[in-house]
Structure formats: structure tokens, C-alpha cells
Amino acid sequence: MNTHRLQLAQKSLLGNSIGDAFGESFFGPEGAVYSAIHFREIPQTNWEFTDDTVMAIAIYTSLEMFGEINQDFIAKAFARNYHLDFNRGYGPAMHRTMRAIEAGENWKEVSKAAFSGMGSMGNGGAMRAGLIGAYFYDDLKKMKKQAFLSSEITHANEEGCVGAMAVAIATAINTQLLIENKTLEPNEFIKKIVVELPNCDTTSKIRKSLTVFPNYDIRTVVSILGNGVKMIAQDTVPISIWIAAHYQTNFKEAIWRAVSALGDRDTICAIVGAITIMNTKDENIPVDWKNKVENWRESQFYQKN
């Protein structure tokens, strides 16, 4: 067991869970949500995370037990945790996938058969990939393969897998920057991610974020990069990467910027949180957020079997 790597993965998972629960609290009447964001008031919430973190917990458990992505183990953990509480925000496709796996169908066949044999290009692979980058921060080749494998379990389409790889790479870069006590100019951060990805729509849109200036109104940013409302990788990952690149060391500001994009706000906040927490000093992570968020270690979803 590599304690150092696991500690890094735990930190990323904490960022994932805080961002996830934070973003989830901002669903509601549009006027109330806009007001809460404007005045920076978190709506009444129990700080419970969604499927984004539930599935990330299974990824962490695989890393803890095997030191790598064990697809069969994770598929079973996904299905078991879904059964424990299926009201955690799973999308329609995931309900079908989880029920099929739970019923004993082969996860490979289920995943690849989705969407008429194209496989899902949803953002579900990306939303749980940050901690993989934290764990394999010093081995990009292995990390990309591990991220691909983690996505393939439920999101076998290339776009879904590349989305997961992009998030893992971003987290790995920010983890390395933490260790070196450095930051990168935002566009250099993004370029380091793009160069590691195969050419596809998701990669193209991440590259497009290089033309988006930090002072743009968030509505303009969303019009260019999306905000996850389509729930696909190419509509979710680019804006998440763009926000993380501009707030590498400022977890709190990154989360507020992420939620202001609206759309699939729990997922965008989860991804941004998993990346930016890595290079944010502990004293700059809001203590009340850490204390209030549902504790993944104590949850029913963290099971080593």
C-alpha cells in the first residue's frame, strides 16, 4: 500500500465531495439560485454528495486495495452502491446500466451496448477521475490508461473516456505543481493537458478554451464551452478544465466560479474541486465546508469487499 499516493487521492476525493455537495445545493428556482450566487450564500442543504462522489469512492477503494483500476471490482462496487441508494442523482442511462450489472449482466457488454452500440459519451467517467490523477501524478502514461479503464466500465465511448483522461491529467499536473510549489500560466496548464489527449470533440473543445479570457462573463464562457446541460463529456469537461486552469491554487474561488456556470453544477463543481484542491493550501480550504460535507469514509458506500 502506497500511503503517500493514497493520501493524495484522498485529498482529491475530498475536493470532489465538497464540490459535488456544494453544487447540488444550488438547484432550485432560478431567481433564488442567481441571488444565492450573487450574494455568495449557500442555500439550505444537508451537504450530501451525489453519484459523482459515490462512484469516486469505488475508484478510491480499488486504488487502496489493488493499487490500480480493477474494472470487475469497481463494476460490482458501482452496482452495490447504486442498490444502497439509487436516489443520488444517477442519470437515466446509468439507472439502466447499474440495474443491468446488478442483475448479473457483463459490464463490458452493457457499457459497449449503450446508445445503440456507441457507448456512453456522458460526463460520468470524468466526474470520478480526479483522484486517479492524484494517485498516479508522476506517471502520465499509466495514469491515462487507468483513467481510460475507469471510464470504460460505464462510459465506453471515446468522448467519455477522453473526458476522464483530461480530468485525471489536470489533477496530476496540479498535484505535481503542489509538490514543486509552483503554478502555471493558465493557457500553459491547458496546453499540457491537450497535448496528452487523442484528437476528438472533447479535446478540440478543451483546446478552444485557450481563446477564452478570464474576464469574460460566465454566460459568455458557457456559450463557448458549455456547462454540462447536455450531460456529455464535451459539454462538461472543457469549462471545468478552463476554470481549474485559472484557479489552480484557489479552491474556494474555483468552486464559486464553477457553480455560477449553472448547468450540471454538481458535476462541474466536483471536477473543479477534485483538481484545484490539490494545489490549494489547507488553510485556504473553507473549514466549514470540510466539516459539513458528508464524510465519504463514514458512508455506507466505502466498503472493502
Image (cartoon, helix red, strand yellow):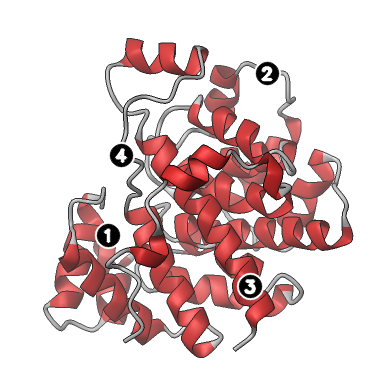
Residue drawn where x is 59% and y is 56% of the image: 167
* Nearest to viewer (mark 2 / mark 1): 2
The earlier-in-sequence mark between 1 and 4 is: 4
- Counting residues from the start of the chain, the first of labels 3 and 1 encountered is 1
What residue do we see at 58% from left, 28% from top? 257
Residue placed under numbered mark 1 in the picture: 115
Say which of 88 and 93 sits in front: 88
The disc placed on residue 216 is: 2
In space, the residues marked 2 and 1 are separated at their CA atoms by 35 Å
Q: Is residue 47 toward the left or the right of residue 136 in the image?
A: left
Verify CB contact (< 8 Å) between mark 4 and mark 2: no
Say whether residue 9 is left or right of residue 184. left
SS for dot 3: helix
The x, y position of residue 87, in whole percent, is 18, 51
- Residue 135 bears which disc, if any? 3
Q: Earlier in the sequence, mark 4 or mark 2?
A: 4
Q: Which label sits in the foreground, 3 or 4?
A: 4
Q: Is residue 113 above or below residue 54?
A: below
Q: Classify mark 4: residues with Cα within 10 Å, few (<14), some (14-19) or many (20+).
A: few
Tag of residue 46 = 4
How would you rate the neighbour count of disc 1 (Cα within 10 Å): few for under 14, some for 14-19, many for 20 or more?
A: few
